[in-house]
Amino acid sequence: MESRVAVIGIIVENGESAGPLNQILHDYAPWIIGRMGIPYPRRRVNVISVAVDAPQDVISALSGKIGRLPGVSAKAAYSNVISKDPSARP
């Protein structure tokens, strides 16, 4: 199975979705390289970027689950870095 490097950009407008968002990220922890969150109180949003190394279907599923949360939007940007080594990630 091929694994790709990608970044998922997340905007959280509804603070009540923070708990479910963190649970989703916890569920996908084996594929997450790292994450960075920036609160932006002036606009009452939080901006989060999540770097992942996973099969494309896993990245798409993660981004889709996040984007379906109320008051949350997510988009994935894929790199051309692809590994055919199945042992690179779970």
Image: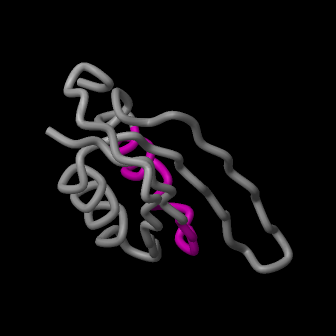
Q: Quadrant of the N terminus?
A: top left
What's the colour scheme? one colour
Q: Position of residue 47 (x, y in %)?
A: 66, 64
Magenta highlight range: 10-25
Position of 26 relative to 58 (above/below): above
| Residue plotted at (75% across, 56% down) | 38
Q: Nearer the viewer, residue 48 or 57?
A: 57
Q: Is residue 1 shown left or right of residue 34?
A: left
Secondary structure mostly taken by the magenta-highlighted segment of the chain: helix
| Relative image position of residue 45 (x, y in whole percent) | 68, 71
Q: In the picture provided, is 13 more to the left or to the right than 19?
A: right
Residue lying at the far right of the rendered structure: 42
Residue 49 on the magenta segment = no
Does residue 37 appear to the left or right of 20 in the view shown? right
The residue under the point 44% across, 70% down is 74
**Res 42 → quadrant:** bottom right
In magenta segment, residue 17: yes
Q: Position of residue 8 (x, y in %)?
A: 48, 60
